[in-house]
Image (tube, rainbow, N blue to C red):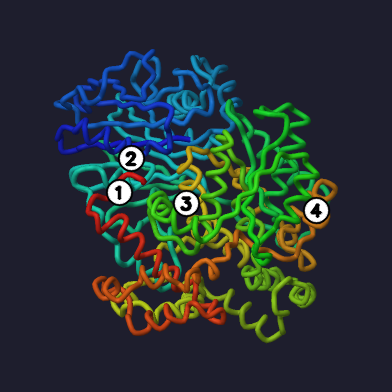
Amino acid sequence: MCGIFGMWNRDGRPVDPVALERATRRLYHRGPDDEGYLLVNTRSGRAIHSGGRDTPRVLGLPAVIESDGKGFDLALGFRRLGILDLSSRGHQPMCTADKAIWVVHNGEIYNYVELRSELSALGHAFSTRTDTEVILAAYREWGESCVARFNGMWAFAIWDMGQRKLFCSRDHFGIKPFQFWHDSGTFAFASEAKALLATPGIPAKPNWPIIGDFLVHGLVDHTDQTCFDGIMNLPPGHSMVIGAADKPPFRYWQISANTNQSGPVGLREVDEFRSLLSDAVRIRLRSDVQIGTCLSGGLDSTSIAVLISRVKGDEGAQFAGAAQKTYSACYQDARCDERSFIEEVVAATSAHATYVYPDSAGLFEDLSNLVWHQELPFQSTSPYAQYCVMKAARRDGTVVLLDGQGSDEILAGYVKYWSEFSAALLQAGQWRRWLPEMRAYPARPPLSLFPALRATMASLLPPRATNAWRAFFRRSGTSMLVSRDLVRMARPNRGEVRCDLGDALSSALHAALFSDLQPLLRYEDRNSMAFSIESRLPFLDPRLVSYVFSLPLAARVEDGWTKAILRRAMAGLLPERVRLRRDKMGFPTPEATWLRADDGEFLRTLLDESSVRRRGLFRWAELSRLVASAVDPTHNERIPELWRCASVELWLRRFVDSSSGAGAST
């Protein structure tokens, strides 16, 4: 929805208004509709509310750069993307009527309507139709525990004048980013690292151990550290307090453990799941701007598209236009193309469909901007397809998009979870069910008994041993390309988030939500915000997630079908060919074909000998042989390794070599 920035010189140094505006403007793409600033003397309580060149004139705010900043040690900056209450009343930083509490907020609290009614009954008055005003009232009523009542995606910072503290919070699953820098003198936070890097004293210095994790193990966004040394992520489902009594990041919400893994999943459970998912879609249609849908041919996004049509027809949800708008990435390469499935859903929903066709020429042309927006290396070229979808949606006037992220992580949508499912069956004592399920599971090639037993036993090991086992195989190829120093720095268990939820599958999916899903959420946030679009994810409604984790194993996998309860819930709603798809593409691109374009010129130019030897990150002899052989279609299995090397080189050139942190997107 927006971009937020703030800094507190806790040693009393004055903030620089020019630096404040410069850092906040780095987030222009996240909020082109408005900007606002607050300067605070945390000792006296004196505050100045200021504006900038994009602030509505009706507010009559002085320009922030007209202040010399003397006497002000705390500053908040804000860029707005108008979604709810498009008037100037939605301006931020927003405060309570007595100006004692201020907030900068990025995201949406979807249940703000219900919370506003509850708070009104408790005596709170409201002057806007925004969810941000509800956050202020909720904080005043319930304090730091207010976040436990929110259903949404958010990253916000509340300045409490009376208690002289900054209360910061991030949503349950980390959909919205909150990054911060904290040393002995300064605490600074922002929606994106590029704003922090525009702040004096915060360098664009590589965090080599985290880069090693990426190159050797393919891990990124798996810990609260970033690839920028000293810049941290506030973890999902956490809050923190900066003030007289600091509170380091603390968890305010967690998923409850399963208690009954062996029971059946009946019609009651299926109906409840459908009801929760439908309501998750319904409240995510609350908007004063045009809404659309990201649509692939998979089960997740197609389910959302169908449910939108039902909600729209039943409740008259606001859409700008008569038909639901869908946006899809397609390819001439049939191995990556899902148009036949997409078209069935478009026909079933009478949607207005837009198709984009990403290609290698577009990738190489847009790559610098893509890296600038993503800010960290990325694991494949898949984010580019999403980037193209977002670009098309914004060109069409769509400002909010619903997407299917999160379903695989709560419903075991990937075949890679079969070993944990197998182990969970044994843990639950379902011996008779184990072998039929293993034979029916949609893995390729078909599983034999011995590999099934071996992988199952590995899943029953302690989490660190399981991770080390998998990391050994994951690093076997790439580690041959990477310098020995980086290999030694890489740690597959760094940032381990797995907890015991009572069975191997639930524990693995919990880890996936807070580790594997994090880079996908970053891709989603940065790609959508690159074009000033808000992306909403119904499958990550905390009510739905909690409910799924309370159900038996059969809700996830049954008779070899993944996402069993979703398939049952969508019976009669989705076209059967889509509902009963066995294959799963994910979000693929013809990556190998793209990187072979012009005989691999892109890779050969990027990873040339002078660059590689200057960096000292890669082993030139091995890398040069692999680059030379990349044009050979029989070497497809090494393309992901080459891309990781290329992605790190691109990131270093865009953010580190220039020494400017994050120059403006071009």
Please identify the residue farthest to the bottom as the structure is shown: 450
Residue type, numbered disc 3: Arg
Numbered tag placed on residue 662 in the rendering: 1
* Number of dots carrying numbers: 4
**SS for callout 2:** loop
Numbered tag placed on residue 568 in the rendering: 4
Q: Which of marks 3 and 1 is nearer the N terminus?
A: 3
x and y, in percent, of residue 265 in the image:
79, 55
Identified at 55% across, 17% down, the residue is: 120
Q: Are marks 2 and 1 in contact (CB under 8 Å)?
A: yes
Task: Kindly tell me whether residue 144 is visible in this rendering.
Answer: yes
Rendering quarter of residue 578: bottom right
The alpha-carbon separation of the residues under discs 2 and 3 comes to 17 Å
The alpha-carbon separation of the residues under discs 4 and 3 comes to 30 Å
Q: For this rendering, which residue is in front, 254 or 72?
A: 72
The alpha-carbon separation of the residues under discs 2 and 1 comes to 8 Å
Residue type, numbered disc 1: Ala
In this figure, which residue is indicated by the disc labeled 2? 26
Identified at 63% across, 55% down, the residue is: 410
